[in-house]
Image: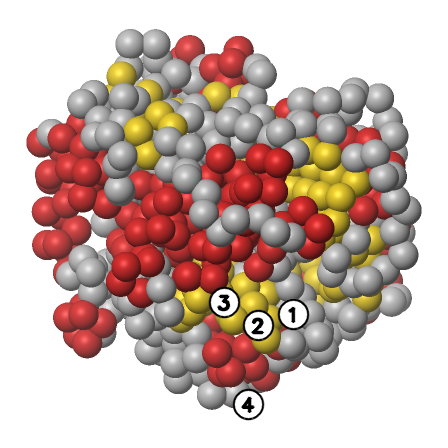
């Protein structure tokens, strides 16, 4: 196979300030290298020491890593612990009064809860679950809005050893049904409705619809949190209000002590094709990874006010809302609403009001906020910020620069964190007090994470060539299996030609400093005149043009070149409505790309839209764009598409 070629030419470097380095948990490159060296010299010992120091064990483990049944790895298996105990009880003696969650509702109402009260509520709700017969190993589907209650629900499951599976509140009844059936859930925890951007959106009726379709017979309880006091159909047989369930429950609930390998949760992630995969995570290994990355990557300090904007429906909300921050005893913001309501200043206002120190969001949110009000952050006092983070897709250098200068006021390092639902926590990301930053690069693998780049035969490719991103050694927090489908787990992540490496499904290259640059999903790679190109670099080049807010590129068959490049572009200004204007702007952009990365990457065709087709987690669905570019009817599954109307617009766009 030919290598995937890198054409992006980004040379800016940002060193951490002396002040930041001095106070950092891992200070300077020497600090980072010392950790890496420790992992290299005694891999199992490195993780074992961290697991002993970081977690509270009811019974200590004696075995660290069991590889005898690879790729079904086991970590700390004979160790016994409880995740909720590690997130709540451990803080009661030292900081029961500390605020755990600052919850801001859609309408701006703020509710705070400290560690003692959160512990009490989790225990009461856990007792309520037990009163319904829910026990160790049962699956519980959670379909709720962002709230203190959703955190309580997840923690309560962890407390009694029930395996939760959170389904994002924006998913349809069909998606919800599919997940309830696959997990064979015994209970669903939901709310009457959710509030988003001033609108009431029903949840309970979606659950009812899902349950009325066959296959959900195991569900014996539907627990409903009253959020919006909205009309709700009621089935007295198995529906129960949250407040009725917890009324009179004891605030003492002895945790269920489980093996470190006990499944903590299943989280479904949609592959680009086929039915969603139930990614199964462990208890001890997973929690360890979230806690270490809170310290290494987020440079967590007890005085921080941490805010991860992700919904708990995604892994980011599991690791950096429900588990990591609580296990560290942090104060964190949890937000119900959306970044654009009541206006595009919402995030900045919340950072100001709650004195947020650490802010973690997604490139798609950053780009849309640039489009809606690039100067808005300047109207707020953002001086509390000390660290920014990015997750979910490659952040293009221009968005990075805006985030750095306008939000972080050139004072805050940006941690661009590459990881996946399957990895449970950050894998390749800066340690902000150690690494110089390069806009668009997620920098270097974390200590103990052995990442590399290989070709189709599983052999290492040389630096500066692109290839498949792999993780060569098992690590404690990784996916254990796909729920109910171990064969698919092996096939998807450990294909034979990869020599037992974990195949992440992304393409990447390393630069002369060993920095990783993610180039896109393997499935999206283009092949133009024999050159394999990742989508990310061309998109970044387009987005660097001052006219452009966002861009996505796909390939379409071409007689001569193999594939032609079709770019879908969202402008900062309005979309051109006549062919002449569209042509003029397209020409400017083609020339721009040609100049910035070379003629090979010049789009053959450019189409303009008001938006791009995205999943509800903000990922661009390039397979749909490919169908449009090829003039095909869209017969594919679009149930995860957030904005279906955009497809028609892009199909009919002038060009
Ligand atoms: C895929 C995983 C990571 C938790 C949320 C999404 C892409 C994620 C980055 C980044 C470049 C990134 C990759 C990855 N991705 N973060 N910082 N730079 N690409 O989890 O839904 O499992 O998606 O998101 O393609 O494989 P996910």
Which of discs 2 and 1 lies nearer the camera? The answer is 2
Verify CB contact (< 8 Å) between mark 2 and mark 1: yes
Dot 3 lies on which element? strand
Which of discs 3 and 1 lies nearer the camera? The answer is 3
In the rendered image, the quadrant that contains the C terminus is: bottom right
Given residues 288 and 458, the one toward you in this image is: 288
- Whole-Å distance between the Cαs marked 2 and 1? 8 Å
Where residue 145 appears, as percent x and y from the top left, is 67, 55
Q: Mark 2 — residue?
A: 111
- Name which residue lies at 23% across and 49% down: 513
Snapshot colouring: secondary structure
Which of discs 1 and 4 lies nearer the camera? The answer is 1
In the rendered image, the quadrant that contains the N terminus is: top left
Q: Mark 3 — residue?
A: 113
Looking at the image, is mark 2 or mark 1 earlier in the sequence?
A: 1
Mark 1 is surrounded, within 10 Å at the Cα level, by few (under 14), some (14 to 19) or many (20 or more) other residues, namely: some
Q: Mark 1 — residue?
A: 105
């Amino acid at each position: 196979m030919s290598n995937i070629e890198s054409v992006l030419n980004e040379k800016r470097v940002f060193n951490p300030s002396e002040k930041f380095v001095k106070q950092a948990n891992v200070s300077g490159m020497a600090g980072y290298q010392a950790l890496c060296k420790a992992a290299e010299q005694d891999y199992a010992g490195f993780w074992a020491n961290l697991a002993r120091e970081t977690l509270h064990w009811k019974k200590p483990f004696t075995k660290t890593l069991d590889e005898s049944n690879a790729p079904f790895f086991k970590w700390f298996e004979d160790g016994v612990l409880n995740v909720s105990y590690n997130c709540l009880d451990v803080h009661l003696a030292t900081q029961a009064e500390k605020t755990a969650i600052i919850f801001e509702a859609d309408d701006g109402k703020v509710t705070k809860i400290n560690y003692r009260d959160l512990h009490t509520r989790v225990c009461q709700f856990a007792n309520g679950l037990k009163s319904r017969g829910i026990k160790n190993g049962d699956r519980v589907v959670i379909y709720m809005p962002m709230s203190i209650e959703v955190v309580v629900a997840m923690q309560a499951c962890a407390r009694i050893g029930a395996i939760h599976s959170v389904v994002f509140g924006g998913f349809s009844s069909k998606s919800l049904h599919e997940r309830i059936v696959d997990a064979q859930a015994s209970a669903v925890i939901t709310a009457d409705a959710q509030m988003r951007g001033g609108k009431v959106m029903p949840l309970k009726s979606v659950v009812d619809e899902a349950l009325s379709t066959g296959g959900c017979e195991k569900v014996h309880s539907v627990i409903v949190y009253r959020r919006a006091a909205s009309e709700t159909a009621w089935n007295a047989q198995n529906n129960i209000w949250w407040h009725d369930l917890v009324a009179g429950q004891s605030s003492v609930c002895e945790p269920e002590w489980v093996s470190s390998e006990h499944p903590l949760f299943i989280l479904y992630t949609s592959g680009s094709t086929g039915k969603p995969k139930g990614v199964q995570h462990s208890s001890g290994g997973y929690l360890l990874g979230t806690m270490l990355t809170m310290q290494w990557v987020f440079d967590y300090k007890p005085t921080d006010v941490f805010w991860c904007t992700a919904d708990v429906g995604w892994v980011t909300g599991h690791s950096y809302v429900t588990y990591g921050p609580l296990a560290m005893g942090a104060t964190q913001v949890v937000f119900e609403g959306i970044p654009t309501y009541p206006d595009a200043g919402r995030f900045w206002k919340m950072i100001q009001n709650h004195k947020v120190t650490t802010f973690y969001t997604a490139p798609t949110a950053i780009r849309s906020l640039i489009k809606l009000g690039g100067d808005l952050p300047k109207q707020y006092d953002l001086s509390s910020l000390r660290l920014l983070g990015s997750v979910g897709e490659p952040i293009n250098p221009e968005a990075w620069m805006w985030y750095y200068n306008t939000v972080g006021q050139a004072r805050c390092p940006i941690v661009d964190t590459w990881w996946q639902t399957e990895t449970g926590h950050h894998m390749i990301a800066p340690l902000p007090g150690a690494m110089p930053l390069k806009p668009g690069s997620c920098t270097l693998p974390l200590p103990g994470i052995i990442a590399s780049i290989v070709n189709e035969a599983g052999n290492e490719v040389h630096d500066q060539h692109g290839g498949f991103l792999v993780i060569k050694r098992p690590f404690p927090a990784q996916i254990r299996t796909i729920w109910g489908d171990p064969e698919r787990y092996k096939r998807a992540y450990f294909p034979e030609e990869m020599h037992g490496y974990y195949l992440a499904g992304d393409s990447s290259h390393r630069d002369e400093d060993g920095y990783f640059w993610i180039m896109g999903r393997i499935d999206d790679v283009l092949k133009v005149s024999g050159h394999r190109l990742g989508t990310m670099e061309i998109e970044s080049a387009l987005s660097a043009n001052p006219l452009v807010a966002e861009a996505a590129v796909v390939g379409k068959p071409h007689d001569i070149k193999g594939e032609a490049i079709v770019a879908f572009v969202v402008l900062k200004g309005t979309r051109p409505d006549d062919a002449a204007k569209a042509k003029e702007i397209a020409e400017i952009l083609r020339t721009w790309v040609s100049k910035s990365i070379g003629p090979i990457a010049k789009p053959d065709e450019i189409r303009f839209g008001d938006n791009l087709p995205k999943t509800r987690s903000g990922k661009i669905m390039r397979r749909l764009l490919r169908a449009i570019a090829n003039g095909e009817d869209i017969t594919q599954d679009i149930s995860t598409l957030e904005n279906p109307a955009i497809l028609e617009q892009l199909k009919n766009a002038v060009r």
